[in-house]
Image (spheres, rainbow, N blue to C red):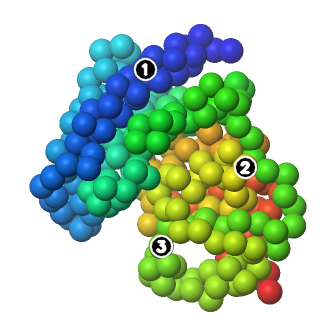
Amino acid sequence: MNADWRSRYQKALEITRAAGQVALQYFDTPLKVDLKGDQSPVTIADRETEMTLRQGLEQAFPGDGFLGEEFGETPNSTGFRWILDPIDGTRAFVRGIPLWATLVGLEYRGELIAGIVDAPALGHTYHALRGNGAYRNTRKISVSDQSDLSRAILFYSSLAWFLKANKEKEFTELVRRTEKQRGYGDWYGFLLVAQGSGEIMIEHGVHAWDVAGILPIVEEAGGRMTAWNGKFELFAPDVIATNGKLHEQVLAIVHGKGT
């Protein structure tokens, strides 16, 4: 195992959990909510949590780069870049819903090599390092082995995104072809797939910081995660995660070929 990868991963676990506690102090309290240019909400909790991540990682690993939702991009001189989402699920956060998390992805020369998702309101930290498996706290997790689409559980964020993407017919077909559907949006649906609690998570309207911390966990758990075109693209607006066995069937339905 690459020593530089492991040292960053282990230190990032500590820093991410500390940042999650910063966010947790603000959770379920009265907060001023501002709207960004894209009309997404932001609060002092988002900003302070990302600053905690940046300061901790920068102090530990000088020269590493950053790409964060709230404070943008800082170039690197080491080949490493941290991709940060201080609170994934801010809309849930400000409404007192505990399905939010702090996401940290570690990229080395363009490859996502580690991911951490800390969900302090639930008491869970999901994490993975390439070649080392995926974990929820200390428990190793893996995707389900379900290969029958009609027995699969489908997770999604919001039907509104499929309307915006002109994919409502395809989404309805996915609903028709799967056994159950649950609207666990943002990070949560992806991690439910990774731990084997469902088989498919599909979403539209994502950014790099929404997926960078999640991809290594899904893949180390044995799953597959791509954009709707079947390839993983960090800056694609759409994403599908599955247990791997159902991925091609889901892609076919998304492209209107699975009926």
First along the sequence among labels 3 and 2: 3
Image vertical order of residue 207 relative to residue 113, above or below:
below
* Amino acid identity at mark 3: Ser
Q: Residue at x 36, y 13 (%)?
A: 60
Query: Which of marks 3 and 1 precedes in the sequence?
Result: 1
**Given the current orientation, which residue lies at the most extreme left position?**
32
Front one among 249 and 195 = 195
Q: CA distance from mark 3 to mark 2?
A: 21 Å
Q: For the point 71% across and 65% down, which residue is it?
A: 153
**Which residue has dot 2 on it?**
196
Quadrant of image for the N terminus: top right
Q: Which residue is mark 1?
A: 14
Circle nearer the N terminus (1, 2): 1
- The residues bearing labels 1 and 2 have C-alpha atoms spaced at a distance of 26 Å
Q: Which residue is mark 3?
A: 158
Secondary structure found at label 3: loop
CA distance for labels 1 and 3: 32 Å
Image point 34% across, 46% down: which residue? 87
* Secondary structure state at the residue bearing disc 2: loop
Q: Looking at the rendering, which quadrant does residue 164 occupy?
A: bottom left
Amino acid type of the residue that numbered disc 2 sits on in the rendered structure: Gly
Q: Quadrant of the C terminus?
A: bottom right
Quadrant of the rendered structure where residue 91 is?
A: bottom left
Q: Residues within 10 Å of mark 1 (few under 14, many from 20)?
A: few
Residue 64 locus on image (x, y percent): 38, 23
Q: Mark 1: which amino acid? A: Glu
- Image coordinates for residue 94, horizontal then vertical, percent: 26, 56
Residue 253: x and y in percent read 73, 78
